[in-house]
Image (spheres, rainbow, N blue to C red):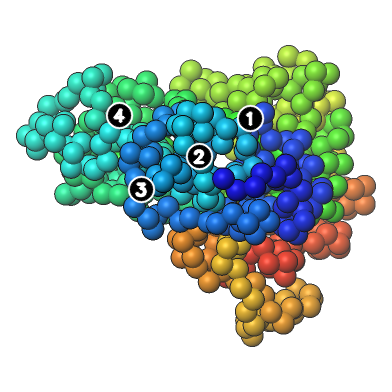
Amino acid sequence: MQQRTHRRLGDLLISAGLINEEQLKTTLEQKNPGQKLGAALIERGYISEQQLTDALSDQLSIPQVHLAGIVIDQSAAELIDQDFARRNELIPYKKKDGQLYVAMANPLDLFAIDDLQMMTGFQVTVSLALPSEITRTINRLYNEEDSVSELMTSMNIRPAEESAGLSVETDTPIIRIINKILTGAVEERASDIHIDPRESSVVIRFRVDGALRTFRTLPREVLSVLVTRIKVMSQLDITEKRLPQDGRVTVTVGKQRFDLRVSTLPTLFGERVVLRLLNTDNLLLKIPNVGFTKEQETLFRKMIARPTGLILITGPTGSGKTSTLYAALNELNSEEQNIITIEDPVEYQLEGINQIQTNAPVGLTFARGLRAILRQDPNIIMVGEIRDTETAEIAIRASLTGHLVLSTLHTNDVPTTIYRLIDMGVDPFLVAASLTGVVAQRLVRRVCRDCARPAAATSIEKGLFAKAGMPCPDRLIKGSGCKSCHQTGYLGRTAVHEMLEINEVISERLISHHDFRDIRNLVHDAGGRNMLENGLTKVSQGITTVEELLKVIS
């Protein structure tokens, strides 16, 4: 076995120049107990899997192995059980001359190596491998049946039986199909799973970094039992196939727990299902992980620290508004505060916070729930979305009577948000008196760290920087495409923001100057950076690209 070292992983990564002391400290403070440091750093976007593996390989002089390109010795893998392999992120891949060759994500885990030697009786030789490759290999080697054709055979499904209804309580093959889909979605970092019925097939697609990608295609005959099983899991009516239904279920995939939001929709070729994956560990629901610049983070903390007022997070569907709201609630959550939320739906369950799910069929709307909340002596109120004038007026009056209120609006930018409140019929005086701040945001894809390369700035890119009055770097960072990012050049997402704190000057002018042009001029005169400028700052830092920015900013 290689010479042992007792250097800590964080020290190795700092000496390699991949992270700094502040990033290490923040990650150690925020990561869940039991979560490995490398995984926590990758999750926060500080390093990529390949960067972590390359750094460890160079620093420790341990060779890398690419598991996808070698034949795994099944007898070597079977020397340990699946739980041990998953828990320690390792997989034996070869036996030779009394040596057991093992691929590990963390070769500094000396306890795992000692346990492995005691369990197998072999001398262990360690190689480095990407954590995702180890997970995929474990899933492939330890599953009893790997192909859909084998699952179909064991299910004995024939076209004529499709509509007859099958017993899903004992249908273990269909459970294995669902498990494979969920595991694949987690491995690919998917936010949503789409089950699309077609005329002769069922297409499974994942939404990764905002774009849909086909995962696999199943035979058409699987659809009925697949949808039925999902309905049973999420406690939906399995006999109702003519109307849309919504449900939820909590599942465990590997070591992670997820809330699945389930939505079914009848279509021409059968029921379509979308599953949204929400990580219940809330690892990233912290203000430093939202994507703010240092100045924006300081201003946002200042706004939410106020005891009263209305703070609005705005943007279209899928722009990360809810994540920003939850990050603020996590920051404010303490024993001294009574925090109550009303949401549709409750996406993440937060310890110590009272969360209410709207229920329109029985009359529990945002407005009615908000009135009830005000009788519960709250300090902080979060309203999932302001959808109508009644909810807006109650939220504003709550902010004027000693409460901090956080909510969202579906608007494009800061000026539009202020104008939208007035357009809904709220008195401009009340808007000016209650509004503390507005944050508008969009999500853009991050440049993949593994294939990031400098490229000369184009004339369009230079023109966009010039339009914003900012200097354009001669060379910008772009992804060339690699296996880590599926040849897209992007891996992960971050947010671009524009933010405005409503001060006394803006409030006074807003009362008498409240048409859209006046509001836009007020925001411009306030001097805050708009979303384009914030995005171009991230472009110049190599975080994203102008192409991504232009997709979300008109």
In front: 28, or 286? 28
**Residue 367, horizontal then vertical, whole percent:** 63, 26
Image quadrant where residue 73 sits: top left
Q: Amino acid at mark 3?
A: Ile
Residue most toward the front?
97
Q: Is residue 207 visible?
A: no
SS assignment at label 1: loop
Q: Is residue 151 visible?
A: yes
Q: CA distance from mark 2 to mark 3?
A: 18 Å
Residue at the disc numbered 1: 34
Q: Amino acid at mark 2?
A: Gln
N-terminal of the two: label 2 or label 3?
3
**Residue 52, horizontal then vertical, whole percent:** 62, 53
At 53% from the left and 71% from the top, the residue drawn is: 480
Q: Amino acid at mark 4?
A: Ile
Q: Is mark 1 in CB contact (under 8 Å) with mark 3? A: no
**Residue 51, horizontal then vertical, whole percent:** 62, 57
Q: Is residue 469 depicted above or below 244 in this figure?
A: below
Q: Quadrant of the C terminus?
A: bottom right
Mark 1 crowd level (few <14, some 14–19, many ≥20, 10 Å Cα): few
Residue at the disc numbered 4: 175
Q: Of the residues tagged 1 and 4, which is closer to the observer?
A: 1
Q: Of the residues tagged 2 and 1, which is closer to the observer?
A: 2
Q: CA distance from mark 4 to mark 3?
A: 27 Å
N-terminal of the two: label 1 or label 3?
1
At 68% from the left and 56% from the top, the residue drawn is: 59
Q: Is residue 384 depicted above or below 553 in this figure?
A: above
Q: Quadrant of the N terminus?
A: top right
SS assignment at label 3: loop
SS assignment at label 4: helix
Direction from residue 217 to residue 162 in the image, left or right:
left
